[in-house]
Image (cartoon, helix red, strand yellow):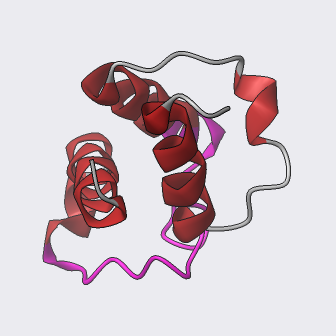
Amino acid sequence: MTKLEIFEVVKVNLVEIMPELALVDIDATKSMKDLGANSIDRVDVVLQSMEALSVTFPLNELGGIENIQGLVDFLEVKVRGEG
């Protein structure tokens, strides 16, 4: 799975959790917090993305991820089974 495909999964989940983002061009350099997601929204997006990508990991591994691109990069490593 490519980073672009993983980004699409994350975007779909963002819009599902936060429908107001449907009309927004989601920029991978922004954080979910920048887009208005509260902590529960952010966890929901991550959990749904994990489920859609069939990966599991402890959420504390996400520490230090600053933006959506960081999340996509992290998820890509997990999808490839390298981390």
Residue 38 within the segment the image draws in magenta: yes
The image quadrant of residue 13 is: top left
Residue 67 image position (x, y, % from top left): 63, 68
Q: Nearer the viewer, residue 20 or 4?
A: 4
Q: Nearer the viewer, residue 21 or 47?
A: 47
Q: Is residue 27 left or right of residue 40?
A: left
Q: Is residue 47 left or right of residue 29?
A: left
Region rendered in magenta: 23-42
Q: Is residue 68 left or right of residue 49?
A: right
Give me the residue at 34% from left, 19% from top: 54
Give me the residue at 14% from left, 77% from top: 23
Residue 5 image position (x, y, % from top left): 23, 56
Relative to 69, is 54 above or below?
A: above
Residue 57 image position (x, y, % from top left): 63, 18
Residue 71 within the segment the image draws in magenta: no
The image quadrant of residue 70 is: bottom right
Give me the residue at 68% from left, 32% from top: 83
Residue 55 image position (x, y, % from top left): 44, 20
Q: Residue furthest left?
A: 23
Principal secondary structure, stretch drawn in magenta? loop
Give me the residue at 55% from left, 58% from top: 73
